[in-house]
Image (tube, grey):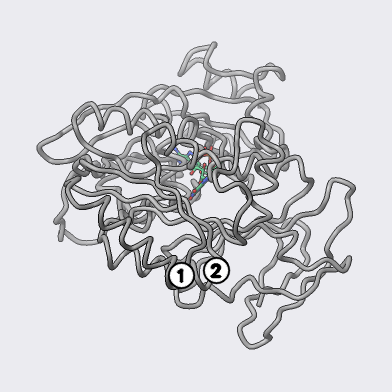
């Protein structure tokens, strides 16, 4: 391994190959401390050619590779288990903004919030947004096909990628940085790298879609009596405004645990409601948007779908609303071990999905589960083991007929969710 390290150091420079344990440490643990690993050394290439050279040298030496971006992935795939670590963090250049083409070409190590800012400077929007946006990188977001809070309106990362450049497992470079919206020249090979978690190559750059900046944005937080009511609300708000860009549902436990454990976060609704719904609206024109939202909220309260609702009066209040949602992962960290799931189902099937009867220690699962409904049809479900280490060994579905069987690969236990 030291030969390989020396060869790579000769190619990309001594200081860009690191085996000092203190410098490696941040790369070897997932931010919640759930996954940790080991590597003989980390290489920090600055160009696509350097990535290609490192891959070729590793292939020749028979060494395995784990690519890493911002190390924000939640399933530990970015943590090496003895492999050579290739960190893309030095590949952090925005190569081009083509405003006329509504596209931006960024290297794999560019942090998402920097892409958002660069787009905004050109009066454009890059709509992907998630709580890890100040650390997560374009390469990692592509490799995990990240979703974020605006999937409802703009789709997942897959829908936001026009072209990809990647280094293949044999060291060759795939050059597919096209900025075309219409491309019928054959196989769409870039798709193979999206969601592939580095298995088919190392993404080194991508051409991304930009959108017009919305002229008006409103953020609402409301209390709903149940997930069924929240679904009814989603359809009411979409029909009434045509402007829903995000719709997040959090249950009481998720909100309470977050408020308890994250000092800077508060519940704007003051603990009201079994379900907290956060809705963001974006529109090309401000005229009429607020009126449409207010009318729809009044009708929703009248219909019993919402108990109380707050509309953010300014950007500061909107940030307070969003802070609650974005702090959920951090809020759950001190509560002990978690089994997190990211479950996609049709929106029509959502409301009854995480209804479970009982867990191993006699507590009902919903008391221990954090459930978030994404209006694009995805439940995020976290089952907790409390800090004292008691486990819920098995959770029984309310209805066997619509049971979703999941494998908790980490502990190789099966959990049934009805
Ligand atoms: C607080 C928080 C909130 C989140 N919210 C969401 C959310 O709302 N929606 C969502 O979808 N995800 C969410 N995530 C997870 C999200 O998928 C990751 O944060 C992000 O996509 C990973 O980017 P990264 O640069 O940190 O990649 P890493 O964590 O470094 O790597 C992730 C995976 O991609 C691979 N990889 C990294 N870079 C490359 C590359 N250049 N080429 C090939 N493979 C590579 C790694 O080997 C690993 O398999 C959240 C994470 C956190 C911490």
What residue is shown with label 2?
227
In the rendered image, residue 4, in percent from the top left (x then y), is placed at: 59, 25
Residue 275 falls in image quadrant: bottom right
Q: Residue at x 55, y 63 (%)?
A: 379
Residue 286 falls in image quadrant: top left
User: Is residue 59 at least partly visible in the picture?
Assistant: no
Crowding at dot 1, Cα within 10 Å, few <14 / some 14-19 / many 20+, comes out as many
Q: Nearer the viewer, residue 244 or 269?
A: 269
Q: Indicate if the residue with disc 2 has its beta carbon within 8 Å of ligand 1.
A: no
Q: Nearer the viewer, residue 314 or 155?
A: 314
Q: Indicate if the residue with disc 1 has its beta carbon within 8 Å of ligand 1.
A: no
Crowding at dot 2, Cα within 10 Å, few <14 / some 14-19 / many 20+, comes out as many
- Please state if 416 lies on the left or on the right of 301 as rendered: right
Residue 387's disc is none
Number of residue marks: 2
Figure check: 293 above or below 29 = below
Quadrant (top left, top right, bottom left, bottom right) of the C terminus: bottom right
Residue 231's disc is 1
In the rendered image, residue 134, in percent from the top left (x then y), is placed at: 47, 30
Q: Nearer the viewer, residue 377 or 409?
A: 377
In the rendered image, residue 273, in percent from the top left (x then y), is placed at: 60, 59
Q: Are marks 2 and 1 in contact (CB under 8 Å)?
A: yes
Quadrant (top left, top right, bottom left, bottom right) of the N terminus: top right
Classify mark 2: helix, strand or loop: helix
Figure check: 4 above or below 333 = above
Q: Residue at x 40, y 37 (%)?
A: 138
Q: Residue at x 63, y 76 (%)?
A: 404
In the rendered image, residue 101, in percent from the top left (x then y), is placed at: 12, 40
Instruction: Using the numbered discs, state the Cα–Cα distance from disc 2 to disc 1 in whole angstroms.
Output: 6 Å
């Amino acid at each position: 391994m030291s030969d390989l390290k020396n060869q790579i150091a000769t190619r990309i420079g001594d200081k860009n190959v690191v085996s000092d344990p203190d410098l490696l440490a941040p790369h070897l643990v997932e931010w919640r401390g759930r996954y940790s690993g080991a590597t003989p050394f980390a290489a920090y290439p600055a160009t696509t050619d350097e990535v290609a050279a490192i891959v070729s040298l590793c292939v020749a030496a028979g060494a395995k590779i784990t690519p890493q971006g911002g190390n924000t992935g939640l399933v530990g795939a970015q943590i090496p288990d003895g492999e050579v670590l290739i960190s893309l963090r030095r590949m952090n250049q925005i190569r081009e903004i083509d405003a006329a083409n509504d596209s931006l070409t960024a290297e794999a190590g560019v942090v998402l919030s920097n892409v958002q800012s660069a787009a905004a400077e050109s009066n454009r929007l890059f709509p992907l947004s998630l709580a890890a946006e100040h650390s997560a990188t374009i390469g990692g977001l592509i490799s995990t096909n990240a979703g974020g809070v605006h999937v409802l309106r703009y789709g997942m990362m897959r829908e936001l990628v026009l072209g990809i450049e990647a280094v293949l497992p044999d060291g060759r470079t795939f050059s597919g940085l096209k900025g075309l919206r219409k491309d019928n020249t054959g196989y769409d090979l870039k798709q193979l790298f999206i969601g592939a978690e580095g298995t088919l190559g190392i993404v080194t750059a991508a051409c991304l879609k930009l959108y017009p900046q919305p002229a008006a944005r409103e953020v609402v937080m409301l209390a709903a009596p149940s997930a069924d009511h929240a679904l009814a609300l989603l359809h009411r708000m979409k029909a009434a405004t045509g402007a829903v860009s995000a719709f997040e549902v959090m249950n009481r436990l998720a909100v309470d645990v977050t408020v308890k454990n994250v000092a800077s976060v508060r519940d704007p609704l003051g603990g009201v409601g079994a379900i907290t719904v956060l809705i963001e609206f974006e529109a090309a024109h401000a005229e009429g948007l607020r009126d449409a939202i207010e009318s729809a909220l009044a009708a929703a309260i009248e219909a019993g779908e919402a108990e109380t609702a707050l509309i953010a009066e300014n950007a500061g209040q909107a940030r307070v609303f969003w802070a609650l949602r974005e702090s959920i992962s951090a809020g759950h960290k001190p509560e002990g071990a978690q089994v997190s799931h990211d479950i996609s189902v049709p929106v029509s099937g959502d409301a009854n999905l995480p209804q479970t009867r009982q867990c191993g220690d006699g507590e009902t699962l919903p008391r221990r589960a954090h459930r978030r409904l994404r209006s694009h049809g995805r439940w995020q479900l976290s089952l907790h083991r409390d800090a004292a280490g008691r486990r819920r060994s098995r959770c029984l579905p309310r209805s066997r007929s619509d049971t979703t069987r999941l494998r908790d690969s980490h502990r190789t236990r099966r959990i049934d969710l009805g």
